[in-house]
Amino acid sequence: MENGVVVCTDKLVRKFHVGRTELVALKEVSLEFRRGEFAGLVGPSGSGKTTLLNIIGTLDTPTSGSATVLGERVESLSPVRAASLRSRHIGFIFQTFNLLPVYTAYENVEFPLLLLGLSSAERRRKVTDALEWVGLADRAKSRPTQLSGGESQRVAIARAVVKRPELVLADEPTANLDAENSHKILQTMVGLNRDLGTTFIFSTHDEKVIRYLRRKVSLVDGRVAEDRTLEPGEVRSQKLE
Amino acid sequence: MTILKLAIRNLRGAGIRTWLNAVALSFAFVAIIFGQGMMQGMNKQAEDASVAFEFGGGQYWQKDYDAYDPLTLEDAHAPTPSALESLARAGKAAPILVVAGSIYPHGRIKPVLLKGIDPAQKVVALPTAALADTAEELPLLIGNRTAATTGLEVGDQVTVQWRDADGAFDARDGRVVEIMQTSVSTIDVGQVWMPLARLRELAGMEGEATIVTVAKDERKPPAVEGWSFRGPEFLLSDLRQMVKTKTVGQVIMFTVLFLLAMLAIFDTQVLSVFRRRREIGMLIALGMTRVQVIVMFTLEGALHSILAAVLGMAYGAPLFYSLQRNGFAVPGGDSWGFSLGDKLYPTFTAGLILSTTVLVFLVTAFVAWLPTRKIAKLKPTDALAGRGT
Ligand SMILES: Nc1ncnc2c1ncn2[C@@H]1O[C@H](COP(=O)(O)OP(=O)(O)OP(=O)(O)O)[C@@H](O)[C@H]1O
Ligand SMILES: [Mg+2]
């Protein structure tokens, strides 16, 4: 992780075989993400956003090219080391089915800490903090079925950041939410990015959240079509002048 | 440890389904222990009774005697060897003379074995004291089954007929002096007991015997020319075989019950691996290895057996305790073919309960593990997308 580079991909290719046809989901994607970035992968459905996030998250391996995540080469990582990397340094937020259904909000957030073998006192402190960050301290005992979509996503965010990971990967975290909840989620993530210095990479095709991005990577048909750094508000108004 | 904790959480969260499975498994549990305890109790009870009433510490058989062939009886008698005679005088052996004959209860003929035994003997638990010679009359002792089939009651007179040593028929009137209640049918059915001295005299077999039963605590029976010694192991082997064959049906029933419970666990596991594949993907994303996920799912399944053991003990323990203490009447009674007595007292040992628990746990763990092998092949990305399995 020299120079604060958290994720680096080099000519990343991911092909899928569907029957006899070959589908290239990622075409020579070369990207670099640095510590503390708040970056979005934007693109239409099928453009390869999830595929890219899965590889960065060490859940999938590239067909060719390479991906280096937190100093580890994804393509040559053993399943056990990959699991350990994820449990220590990577937090995930998914679009739906984010929470473990039979656990309470508290237990969901506690889960990564259990895997890390933290003491119960430490767990309690960190879980309480994380639930406070997302404004759900009073819903600790609720089960996923008793939470709204927005609340569920915020619990998922708390679970992703509770272990203070280097990197949080979020795959369309707002896709199932209304505008108000989407803004809340993004504000929460922006706040955590600012306060904890956590790197966020997330995918979206939701126009209303794009204005929160400080970097926008546009994917089209598995290729990087555009990679722009934005300063929300100011940058755009400067450009208009 | 963490994984065990997670498995327990999942089980708790699964709610009613967990309990249904555990209850089903607990039935199998209790049934297996009950069946085993009943079998052990039956065995022990039947053996104890047979030893007390019939076999003692073993029997000397006159060399021509074959318990399975009544035709051998004609020749199967010989003077009691002096070694056994002195044992008998010391109260450590009881010579028994067996002669084929008939009785005529209420005018009907009924072939029986006439058995002569010393009324003063204490070697077997037969109430022979009732035969103590009093008058001229021939005193007879019969069992409750013979009494029932012949309609004879205490005080009834009945004609007894036999063939003496020379093969000539002879007859005498006897009187039933006692009807004994015994669970051992092999000293009852088709048999009439009388004083040894009288039978010897009537049959013209002075000083002779067919069987010499030795006392239970007689450790070293001497070898005797012309007689073969049959130890308790030999004498009980038939009985043990019989208990085995009679209880095989129950063993099958319990096995089926157990298999059904295992099927329920298997089914639950297959369903849960399928339904929870997104969850499996999520667990892997959160940093669990596949092996950990498999262990967790397997534990979830196997823990059903612990729950079942606890549940089963909750209602099984009082049941077992009271059965073992108070016994219970076995339906079918004598139709079992061996002596059960009025009541059966099952024996539930700690070893039995412990070994059953361990066995059930291991089998459940194995059955719970089978469907989780799918997880090993599941790609986390597919699982997260709800594809696969
Ligand atoms: N496991 C797979 N097997 C076959 N094809 C796949 C698989 N995963 C993804 N694809 C294909 O790869 C392409 C990129 O998929 P991906 O899920 O990365 O798109 P996306 O940008 O996340 O789309 P969306 O916005 O709908 O989530 C799509 O055409 C998809 O059908
Ligand atoms: Mg996607």
Image (cartoon, rainbow, N blue to C red):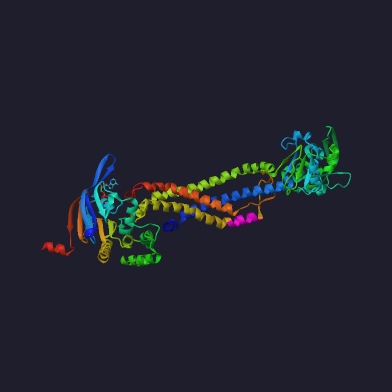
Q: How many marks?
A: 0
User: Is residue B139 toward the left or the right of residue A108 in the image?
Assistant: right
Who's the residue at 47% across and 50% down the image?
A: B365
User: Is residue A179 toward the left or the right of residue B232 in the image?
Assistant: left
Asked if residue B352 is positioned above or below residue A190 in the image, the reply reads above
- Give x and y (percent) for residue B338: 68, 44
**Magenta range:** B317-325
Who's the residue at 44% across and 46% down the image?
A: B370
- Give x and y (percent) for residue B35: 59, 49
| Residue closest to the far left | A241
Who's the residue at 18% across and 60% down the image?
A: A230
Q: Quadrant of the C terminus of chain A?
A: bottom left
Q: Is residue A220 visible?
A: no
User: Is residue A153 toward the left or the right of residue B24 in the image?
Assistant: left
In the rendered structure, does residue B22 fall within the stretch colored magenta? no
User: Is residue A237 toward the left or the right of residue A208 in the image?
Assistant: left
Closer to the camera in the image, B108 or B381: B381
Asked if residue A126 is positioned above or below residue B163 in the image, the reply reads below
Q: Quadrant of the N terminus of chain A?
A: bottom left
Q: Is residue A178 visible?
A: yes
Indicate the quadrant where residue B246 lies: top right
| Residue closest to the far right | B136
Indicate the quadrant where residue B256 lies: top right
- Give x and y (percent) for residue A8: 23, 54
Magenta segment main secondary structure: helix
